[in-house]
Image (cartoon, helix red, strand yellow):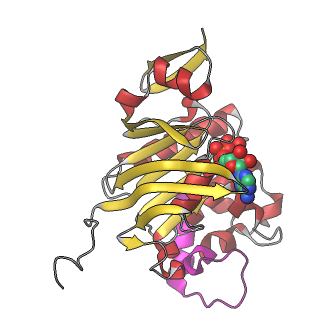
């Protein structure tokens, strides 16, 4: 391979976006976005409703293509790679995925089918190792006792844990979480944040990108942050540099005071 043919991304870069724009119906959902995520980084993406967070995550999940610019995921350029080969290397838990799970599917099947990049068991063939791994992950997430329950009968918090186990099923190189704490009660939210914090601390764990609306949900151990507003980056980089009252105020377009205590954030209007 000549130098010109060599992949532009080094092995530790899991996401590289350059000059990315996404345009739909004449509107810029994302514009002029440059972003690099390394294997050992744990990102949070924060912004108000409609900022473009889910669009960004869908690009990172190889679920859509940019209108302009380039997206490289795990060393492969979107548009030049078979996304069906790429997707099992990416763990995704998102409301849109949750909405596609057939209600009568058991929790165990929801987790196990991730290896095939499908929701809903169809004609896949599973080996005992798939079953074992699904059980180990469900145990880790505290939902093993619910393995035989239909997904539709689970509570919001139980579903989130099942989806997290599913996202980890393929031992992904990157983990993408879209509002994992949405709809959880205080205890379930704190349990989830503790779990995400543990994952973040695992040096062998995947690069992680978590989308949220709430600074309270940022798990200790997050290393980087991106603040988005109207499809544009307000600030991005090391968490401590990005998470300031000024940046947060600019992102949510109101005077906000950001405080942190024991590696957790709170924000309120001044
Ligand atoms: N196909 C489309 N055509 C036009 N606008 C769209 C389309 N899809 C999404 N949008 C708009 O793009 C913007 C960004 O959407 P996106 O779902 O990425 O935002 P978000 O930051 O995840 O929002 P939320 O926090 O409310 O989930 C929104 O204003 C949405 O209405």
Q: Residue at x 52, y 73 (%)?
A: 87
Residue 29 visible, this orientation = yes
Q: Position of residue 8 (x, y in %)?
A: 27, 68
Q: Residue furthest front?
A: 26
Residue 6 is covered by the magenta coloring: no
Q: Quadrant of the N terminus?
A: bottom left
Q: Residue furthest left?
A: 2
- Main secondary structure found in the magenta portion: helix
Q: Is residue 106 above or below residue 180?
A: below
Q: Residue at x 71, y 60 (%)?
A: 96
Q: Quadrant of the C terminus?
A: top right
Residue 244 appears left or right of 109: left
Front-most of 191 and 258? Answer: 258
Residue 44 appears left or right of 27: left
Residue 157 visible, this orientation = no
Q: Position of residue 195 (x, y in %)?
A: 50, 45
- Start and end of the magenta stretch? 113-140
Front-most of 52 and 180? Answer: 52
Q: Is residue 69 above or below residue 222?
A: below
Q: Residue at x 25, y 65 (%)?
A: 10
Q: Is residue 204 above or below residue 2?
A: above
């Amino acid at each position: 391979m000549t130098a010109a043919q060599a992949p532009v991304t080094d092995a530790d870069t899991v996401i590289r976006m350059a000059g990315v724009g996404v345009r739909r119906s004449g509107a810029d959902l994302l514009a002029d976005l440059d972003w690099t995520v390394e294997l050992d980084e744990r990102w949070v993406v924060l912004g108000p409703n409609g900022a473009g967070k889910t669009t960004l995550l869908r690009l990172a999940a190889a679920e859509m293509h940019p209108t302009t610019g380039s997206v490289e995921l795990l060393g492969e350029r979107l548009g030049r790679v078979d996304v069906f080969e790429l997707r099992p290397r990416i763990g995704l838990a998102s409301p849109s995925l949750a909405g596609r799970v057939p209600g009568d599917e058991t929790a165990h099947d929801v987790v196990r089918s991730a290896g095939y990049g499908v929701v809903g068991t169809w004609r896949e063939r599973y080996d005992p190792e798939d079953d074992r791994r699904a059980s180990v992950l469900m145990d880790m997430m505290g939902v093993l006792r619910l393995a035989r329950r239909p997904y539709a009968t689970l509570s919001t918090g139980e579903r989130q844990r099942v989806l997290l186990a599913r996202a980890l099923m393929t031992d992904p190189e990157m983990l993408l979480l879209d509002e994992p704490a949405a709809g959880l009660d205080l205890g379930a939210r704190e349990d989830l944040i503790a779990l995400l914090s543990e994952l973040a601390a695992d040096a062998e764990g995947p690069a992680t990108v978590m989308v949220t609306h709430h600074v309270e949900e940022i798990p200790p151990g997050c290393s980087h942050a991106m603040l988005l507003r109207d499809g544009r980056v307000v600030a991005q980089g090391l968490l401590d540099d990005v998470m300031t009252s000024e940046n947060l105020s600019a992102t949510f377009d109101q005077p906000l005071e950001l405080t942190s205590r024991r590696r957790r954030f709170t924000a309120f209007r001044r």
